[in-house]
Structures are given as structure tokens and as C-alpha cells.
Image (tube, rainbow, N blue to C red):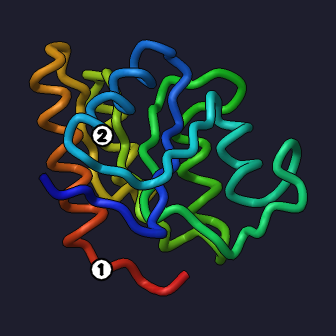
Amino acid sequence: MNVIASNKSILLVEDNPDDEALAIRALKRHHIGNEIVVAHDGVEALDYLFGTGIYKGRDINIKPTVVLLDLKLPRIDGLEVLRRLREDERTKLLPVVVLTTSNEEQDLLNSYSLGCNSYIRKPVDFMQFSDAIRQLGMYWLLMNEVPPL
């Protein structure tokens, strides 16, 4: 039983406590032991990444390996978070995977237009969701080579 762990962290941006718990449970179930930082809305995600607000003073040179971004978020939605990440030199190359329940084609098109690296619709069934998280973790944390940020 291998445990995937390293200094590579995951930023999970999710406002739904049930989906947050499912994602964390699925990552642990598949022995992905990387640090998981959770932001519960778009403002908190941006504060974390840019070292502002409640994260003022955080070393912003330490970036997550991947951002798992829900679209339907309070305060600032996921598309606006993505837009701001891609506009900023410090985060424009940061891998962002949109992980959403949205079936709206426009959300898919907008996400790719704004520069997401991948778009995954959350399966309703836990086993399918768990398998999607396993594959996501294996690819983004083990196989994918990220540019130096």
C-alpha cells in the first residue's frame, strides 16, 4: 500500500461541507497523504494564494501543486477566481482543475477560455467520485510536471 506524500500540497476550494468531506475522504482512501488546504469561498482561496486577508504574511512562494476549484462559490465565484489567477504573473501557470457539479456548457467553455487545465464534473455516486479523485491525484501529484512558479 503506497502512500503518495510529498511537499506537494492541494488547495481544495469548496463551499459545500459534504463535497469537501467526500473529496478529503476519497484522497485519504487512495492513500494520497499530501497536505490539503481548504478554502470555503473564492475570497479565501485568493487570500491564501496571494497572502492577503486571513492569510496575510503567508509565504506565497509556497504554492499548491494543484488547485481543485469549484465554480459555484459564495462571495467570489470560481470563474472569477480563475480569471484572477490567470491575470497575475505569480499564479498564471498554477495548475487549476475545475471540479464542479455544473452541467452548464457555458461553464465548461468559460473555464477553458479562462485557462483551466482540466474540467471534471463531480459524479453523484461516491465510488465514481472516489475513483475520479484517485485518478486526479495520481495524475496531478505524481505524473504531471509543473512549471517552476
Give me the residue at 16% from left, 38% from top: 132
Q: Give residue 84's position: percent from left, percent from top.
A: 64, 55
Question: Measuring 49% from the left and 86% from the top, which residue is drawn there?
Answer: 148
Query: Which residue does the numbered mark 1 point to in the structure image?
Result: 145
Q: Nearer the viewer, residue 117 or 131?
A: 131
Give the class, few, some or many, for how many residues have Cα within 10 Å of label 1's Cα (few <14, many ≥20).
Answer: few
| Mark positioned earlier in the residue sequence (2 or 1) | 2
Q: Which residue is mark 2?
A: 27
- Label pair 2/1, CB-CB below 8 angstroms: no
For the C terminus, which image quadrant?
bottom right
User: Would you place residue 134 above or below residue 16 in this image?
Assistant: below
The residue depicted at 38 percent of the width and 55 percent of the height is 116
Q: Could you tell whether 69 is left or right of 39 in the image?
A: left
Local SS, label 1: loop
Q: Residue at x 50, y 15 (%)?
A: 17
Query: In the rendered structure, which amino acid carries the disc numbered 1?
Result: Glu
Amino acid beneath label 2: Leu
- The part of the image, by quadrant, that contains residue 3 is bottom left
Q: Residue furthest bottom?
A: 148
The reply, left or right, for residue 7 in relation to residue 103 is right
Q: Position of residue 74 (x, y in %)?
A: 65, 21
Q: Which dot, 2 or 1, sits closer to the camera? A: 2
Q: Is residue 53 above or below residue 76?
A: below
Whole-percent x, y for residue 68 in the image: 42, 45
Residue with the most extreme front position: 1
Secondary structure at badge 2 equals: helix
